[in-house]
Image (cartoon, rainbow, N blue to C red):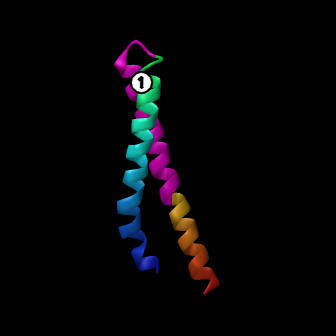
Amino acid sequence: MTDLYPAIALIFSPVAAAMAFLIVYDEYQRHFTERKNALKIALKAALATFIFFNILLFLFLQAVRFLR
């Protein structure tokens, strides 16, 4: 099961990060006149989402391994 961690992380974490980027960018481009500010905030949100999902997946798989 833990052998699947890299495959799952490589597939779902970037997808989640891309979705977070699109949602945040779409919302913040309405609030900022400069595109640069909205882009910076959206990239930070995407990076935070990517890291969060990787940590969450790692902890879940460690818990599964521990319970076996």
- Amino acid under disc 1: Ala
SS state under label 1? helix
- Look at the image and say whether residue 39 sits in the magenta stretch: yes
Report whether 63 appears left or right of 19: right
The x, y position of residue 46, in whole percent, is 43, 42
Front residue of 51 and 11: 11
Q: Give the farthest residue toward the top.
A: 33
What residue is drawn where x is 40% and y is 75%?
A: 4
Q: How many marks?
A: 1
Front residue of 25 and 9: 25
- Dominant SS of magenta comes to helix
**Crowdedness of circle 1 by 10 Å Cα count: few (<14), some, many (20+)?**
some
Where 9 falls versus 2 (above or below)?
A: above
Report whether 67 appears left or right of 48: right
Where 66 falls versus 13 (above or below)?
A: below
- Look at the image and say whether residue 7 sits in the magenta stretch: no
What residue is drawn where x is 35% and y is 61%?
A: 11
The x, y position of residue 17, in whole percent, is 42, 47
Front residue of 28 and 66: 28
Q: Which residues are magenta?
A: 32-54
- Residue 38 position by quadrant: top left
Residue labelled with disc 1: 38
The x, y position of residue 27, in whole percent, is 47, 27
The x, y position of residue 1, in whole percent, is 46, 80
What residue is drawn where x is 50% and y is 56%?
A: 53
What residue is drawn where x is 41% and y is 29%?
A: 26
